Image (spheres, rainbow, N blue to C red):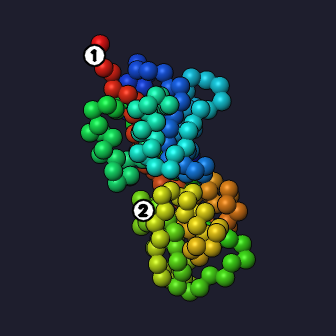
Amino acid sequence: MTRTAGWIDTVLTAGPAVESIGTLGPAGTSSEQAALYLWADHGSGGPPDIALFDTYEEAGEALRKGAVSHVVLANAYAAVHSFYMDPTLQFAGAFLFDTPLYGIAVSPGRRIPDAARISTHPAPVALVEELLPERYSVAEIRYATSTSAAAEQARRGETDLALTTQPAARANKLEFISRTRPIRMLWSVFTLAATDS
């Protein structure tokens, strides 16, 4: 599938330069891939300056403290409204971007019970039923802070399987046991609100 983007640009072009980007980590998240896309389109040049945080809220706090110039987050995030309503932040733009491939992954050689414990980020949980091979059922869904954290849980044996992305699966040496598919998502970009001097 071709990655195409449609931009809603409010201050990305005319606003502060994209010097650094904060988003949800660890490495391998869809958010990291979206930040790389934002950097390629609007970054100040050179190697990408992307800081990965445990939560979007931590990325927002880094923005408020000036540690990053912009934050990118998925509009599928349940608390995205808090960024839109924060008077210290300014909506800078949004773009459509396909996530990396999602799939159900397992550590090589791990025995998978018929009723499996599966880790996932809450946002793509509906994909568990869609992608889980028919021979398995869900015994438990354990929520993780990101798709990469879900992959880490499966790698450590805390769950049998993970719904995760291809980069996160690769980083954690997991193998997909299901078909894979991307998700077309809307990503929002924020910067600090201009202050009257």
From the viewer's perspective, is residue 152 above or below residue 136? above
| Image location (x, y in percent) of residue 177 | 63, 72
Report which residue position mark 1 lands on. 196
Asked if the residue at tag 2 contacts the one at tag 1, i.e. Cβ–Cβ closer than 8 Å, the answer is: no
- What residue is at 46 percent from the left and 78 percent from the top? 140
Residue density around tag 2, few if under 14, some if 14–19, many if 20 or more, within 10 Å: some
Q: Quadrant of residue 162?
A: bottom right
Q: Quadrant of the C terminus?
A: top left
Horizontally, residue 168 falls left or right of residue 72, namely right
Q: Quadrant of residue 178?
A: bottom right
- What residue is at 63 percent from the left and 73 percent from the top? 157
Instruction: Using the image as rendered, state which of residue 10 and residue 153 is in the foreground.
Output: 153
Report which residue position mark 2 lands on. 122
Q: Give the distance between the C-alpha atoms of the residues marked 1 and 2, in whole angstroms.
A: 39 Å
| Image location (x, y in percent) of residue 190 | 39, 34
- What residue is at 68 percent from the left and 58 percent from the top? 170
- What residue is at 46 percent from the left and 41 percent from the top? 59
Residue density around tag 1, few if under 14, some if 14–19, many if 20 or more, within 10 Å: few
Residue 178 visible in the picture? no
Which SS class for mark 1? loop
| Image location (x, y in percent) of residue 24 | 50, 47
From the viewer's perspective, is residue 105 above or below residue 133? above
